[in-house]
Every structure is written in structure tokens, then in C-alpha cells.
Amino acid sequence: MKEIILINIAGDDKPGLTASITGILSTYDVNVLDIGQSVIHDTLSLGILVEVPAAAESSPILKDILFKVHELGFSVRFSPIDIDDYEHWVQGQGKARHIITLLSRQITALHISALTDIVAKHDLNIDRIERLSGRVSLTHENSEKSKACVEFSVRGSLADMASFRGELMQLANKYDVDVAIQEDNMFRRNRRLVVFDMDSTLIEAEVIDELAKAAGVGEQVAAITERAMLGELDFIASFKERVALLKGLDESVLAGIAQNLPITEGAEKLVSTLKQLGYKTAILSGGFNYFGRHLQQKLGIDYVYANDLEIVNGKVTGNVTGTVVDGARKAELLREIAQREGISLDQSIAVGDGANDLPMLSIAGLGIAFRAKPLVKESAKQSISTLGLDGILYLLGIGDRYSK
């Protein structure tokens, strides 16, 4: 009768262990049913689930492994697995899988405990835990720019996804961390297009507010901008109202503001990594093309769609030309770019912070509210508030070792 045995080996990491153990197993024609290995702080843990053929006996196999493991300085544990338990485990592979990503400047045991309590409460099993962020130095700390990310692969059916997401959001708000949950499907590993809002997303400023300061109407425009981003005002009407207040501004002011735009933390790393991976990128902005094109050249963005600020005789007229890029237009542009590139919406990512970004966030395969207003954060499926834009790479499963 066939035997199923789980072999667990642990000890100080060194080359040759896996080769030695599987070499022994191969001499007995053993079938490997599952295998997994991890290393934490130079300590290795190797698990191999094997099927010993009926013609062989397990005793000689286990004896040979025990001698080899002792020789290499490792410890080993053998666990017989009942065939019914094994078949029950096999049936579990058809269950839904999700990826939960925990992000913060620093992750503590409290954060992980709170998160895994919620996971257990909803009857989900954790199959894998992996740190995506780089190793942390304790002697050269830079807490302001530090990053921490742990990814959990969980298995099981969620009876109430809305309730689960709500509890994760409460956890995020309570402990000032970000928690994202995604279905672990083929699209997560095959994204091809990322579209960004510009103001307060790719740059840490609202350009129209900077123009207003230069025109001496800063407080008036900033108040209207804030209400529009919160979703309290119609975007197009409020946009035209703000632009009208810029009438008479000298064109030379635009160049000075463009040269000093504060790029958001992580934006350059994110875009350069995406380019290396073959992604298409776009700016879809309710701001102005003048500044969008400046960022396009600086970051290497493929597409830019924004508003044209009318300038006559070197002066801003207070008008915009063409179709105003509002929320509905952003969603329409996302569809157009995806179709042009032969990319499905499921393969797209949209990133923004304001209420006028919600339409594109809702139709993208992965919609991310970045350092967003409360309404947007609550409405979007994913949000990042604690890290820079390069934190998005973690949601794609891209660790620091691949994105330096």
C-alpha cells in the first residue's frame, strides 16, 4: 500500500540540502506531491510531501534521510498523512484565492495579529506569507521614507465580501496602515496599462491652486478646489469658475511653476519600473496639458490628456478650449487607450485622489485611491495612504528586490 509522508527539515541555511534530500528520494522512485521552502534570517525551513510507492518501504528512505540531515546539521520531522486527509487537502485547490497586502512605514506584530484575526474570523486559510519590502537596517534608520509590506495568500470562500472589506478598512484606519485585498486571478499577474491623475497624485500639488496664488486669488480658488475634490461641487462648473479667476495671468508664470512641480514620492521609481516591464502609462487629468506634457517628458509617460488653458497675447484669458476632462471623460479615455493598445479593462490600473477620479477607478481592473479624500477612499476598492506611489508595485506582487 502506498504511503504519504510529510518531511519537515529546519536549520541554518546552506547550499546542497534540497539536492541531497531529493537525491535520496529519487533512488527509491518517490513521487513528490508538494514542496515548499523558505528562509528567514538565514534559517531554512523545507517541507516535502511525498508518496512512497507500494513496492518500496518507507523505513530505509527515512533512515537515509535522517542520516543525511544529521550529517548536514539540520533537524527533521516525519509525519504520516492519512489518505482521506490528503484527498480533502487536494479538493481545497478549487477554492477561491485572494491576495491580502499589508503596507505601512513599519509593520508590527499588532498589525499582523489584527489582520490575521479578521482572516480567521471569515474562515479563510493562509497558504503563504511573504515579505515584499527590503530588509530593514536597525543602525541606519530613515523612518520617514521606510517601507514595509507583507503579502498573504489566503484560500476560501468569502460569504460576505462587503463585511470583510469593511473590517479591513476599520483596521487600516485604526492603526494607520493600508490593507488591500484582490482576487488572485490571471489578470493580477498580467496588468498592462496604468493611468494616473496628475494633481495630488503624480505631483504633490494642485496646479490650479499654484496658478491662483500667482494671480492673487489663491484662497478663493483653493476653497473651490477643495469642495470639488470632495465631491460637493460639479467638477466642470467649478473648474470653469476657477479658471475664470486666472484671467490676466502672464504666460511666463506657467514655466516657473512647471519647473518646480514637486514629484510625488515613489513616482519616478514606479513609472521607470513599469516601463521596464512593458506597461503603457497615461496621465488623465482635470488639470492642464501644459503641465501634463512637462511631466510626460520628465517621467516618460506614453499618453497625456488634460485641459488646454487658453492664452492670447501672452496672457491667460480665463477660458479653456476643447472638451473639459472631468470624471466621465477620464473613464471614456481609459476605455479608448485600452482599446487602442489591445488591452482589456481587467488589465488596467487607475490611480487618483479626487471624486472626479472615481469613474475611472470603478472600471479599471485595479482602481487605487492614492492619499485620497475620504469619499474616494471609502468608494475605491483599494487605497494607499501611508506609502509613496511605488507602493503600487507591492499590489502587483513586485518586491523591492525586483524594482531597485
Image (cartoon, rainbow, N blue to C red):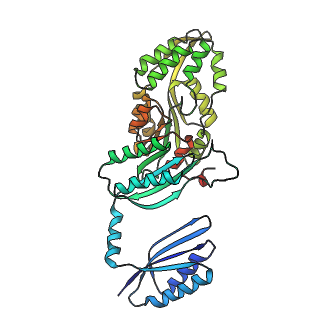
Residue 208: name its quadrant. top right
Judge by depth and name the residue closer to the eye, 112 or 80.
112
Judge by depth and name the residue closer to the eye, 221 or 183.
221
Vertical placement of 27 versus 197: above or below?
below
User: Which residue sits at x=39%, y=84%?
Assistant: 3
Q: Where is residue 286 in the image (x, y as percent from the top left)?
A: 48, 25
Residue 247: name its quadrant. top right
Judge by depth and name the residue closer to the eye, 105 or 259.
105
Vertical placement of 84 versus 184: above or below?
below
- Tell me the quarter of the image containing the N terminus: bottom left
Q: In this view, does 251 lie to the left or right of 158?
A: right
Which residue extends farthest right? 139
Res. 101 visible in picture: yes
Q: Where is residue 61 in the image (x, y as percent from the top left)?
A: 49, 87
Q: Position of residue 339 (x, y in %)?
A: 42, 39
Which residue extends farthest left? 159
Judge by depth and name the residue closer to the eye, 227 or 355.
227
Vertical placement of 206 versus 173: above or below?
above
Q: How many labels does the image show?
A: 0
Vertical placement of 191 versus 60: above or below?
above
Q: Position of residue 333 (x, y in %)?
A: 44, 32
Q: Is residue 299 left or right of residue 95?
A: right
User: Which residue sits at x=52%, y=47%?
Assistant: 103
Res. 365 visible in picture: no
User: Which residue sits at x=40%, y=91%?
Assistant: 55
